[in-house]
Amino acid sequence: MPARALDARALAALAANPGCRRRAILDGAGVDKAALADALGSPSAFGQSQFAFMRGNAFEARVKADGGAELLRLAHQRLDPGAEPPRQARVPDLTAAGPEGRAERTAMALREATAAGGWTLLDHPMLALEVAGSPAYLEPDAVAVHPDGSWTVVEIKSFPMLDGSADPAKVGAAARQAAVYVLALEDVAARIARDVPAQDDAPDGAPAPRVRHRVLLVCPKDFSNLPTASAVDVRKQRAVTARQLARLTRIQDIADTLPEGVCFSPELPAEELTAAVEAVPATYAPECLAACELAFHCRAHSRAQGAVTALGRSVRAELGGLTTVEDVLAAAHGEAGDPDDPAVAALRRAARLRAEALSGHQDALGGHPAHRDHAHGDHREAVCR
């Protein structure tokens, strides 16, 4: 099966759930999770319509027309108004063989642009970032090099900015994606800073490479196809992503725990494929529904096991060592659990309060048996929640 390359969106989603070994190894192996979900009988709702894809490509081409003149004008206006205007910007050729070659060519272009000064636009550069012990190759929309030698990540999105502001959820997703590119650029800057002093042909007084933590988000203005831009500070997203990526278990360590012959090909029989997927532990949370193609499969499995993770990370954290719904109900009803455990004590207190509330409700209803049975069911459901 052809491997699917890791992109910044997948890395941002992986960093948001670093404890999920299933996603880590599937992404590291380049498995097509959408095809895998279809083969498992839990198809995902992910994907972009062909119309939206074509509209996004057309908007990006317009933004980058004439050597990126409009894009750099927006970068100058929003990020660096004190610098010289980008009248004659350079757009170097970044073609090379394979992702490794493109990453090296991008690093060379960044070094040359930093030393030369002036404005430079890198169109679809290739960046490398080590993730869980394996290299991931990332391709941002663009990187702008400022006259002072600093670098800015450019994200081009097709959702509109209405009256100067965009959908906060979409801006947040774009910021998390851009934070991954910032981390990868920082690795390139650190390598250039180490290599430049060792080169005899390095110009004197050349500016040191520096990655800006404010990225340029370019979107259509209002309901038109005209580009506008906003500077987005991604320092918080960068710090969170760096910390979460550092927590990822090495992919080789996960692979070493798998049985011999495990394969994730969607062409396998459903029973064999399901067994292979279940051989890797997953950490499901409701947030996965917005970030992972296997979320529906993992949710069904989590519900079948009665795992409290299906109720959300905050609920899971409050319940301590109680990992299943049955354990929670047993602890709440005094049938199991240590009374000194704060989670057990809180559950029993909640159960008592609920019982008292339902008792008062029953009195108001006149104690009708049907109402009593319904109230008892509500009580168990509320304790579970």
Image: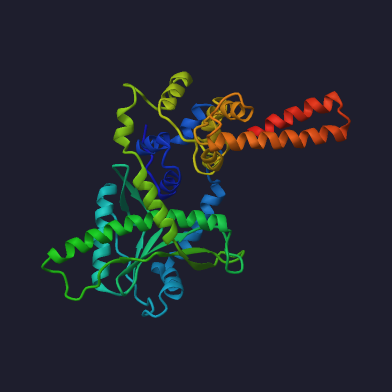
Question: In front: 30, or 277?
Answer: 277
Question: In front: 371, or 130?
Answer: 371
Residue 286 is situated, as x and y percent measured from the top left of the image, at 55, 40
Tell me the quarter of the picture where residue 113 sits.
Answer: bottom left
In this rendering, would 33 be left or right of 257?
right
Quarter of the rendering occupied by the C terminus: top right
Question: In front: 370, or 198?
Answer: 370
Residue 374 is situated, as x and y percent measured from the top left of the image, at 78, 28
Tell me the quarter of the picture where residue 121 sits.
Answer: bottom left
Residue 192 is situated, as x and y percent measured from the top left of the image, at 22, 61
- Label total for image: 0
Q: Give the residue drawn at x 50%, y 60%.
A: 59
In this rendering, would 218 be left or right of 96?
right
Q: Give the residue drawn at x 39%, y 64%.
A: 213
Residue at the extreme front: 340
Quarter of the rendering occupied by the N terminus: top left
Query: How is the protein colored in the picture?
Result: rainbow
| 260 in relation to 71, above or below | above
Residue 57 is at least partly visible in this image: no
| 349 in relation to 71, above or below | above
Residue 196 is situated, as x and y percent measured from the top left of the image, at 17, 65
Q: Give the residue drawn at x 42%, y 39%.
A: 19
Tell me the quarter of the picture where residue 82 sits.
Answer: bottom left
Question: In front: 42, or 312?
Answer: 312
Q: Give the residue drawn at x 53%, y 34%.
A: 340
Residue at the extreme left: 200
| 103 in relation to 222, above or below | above
Residue 321 is at least partly visible in this image: yes
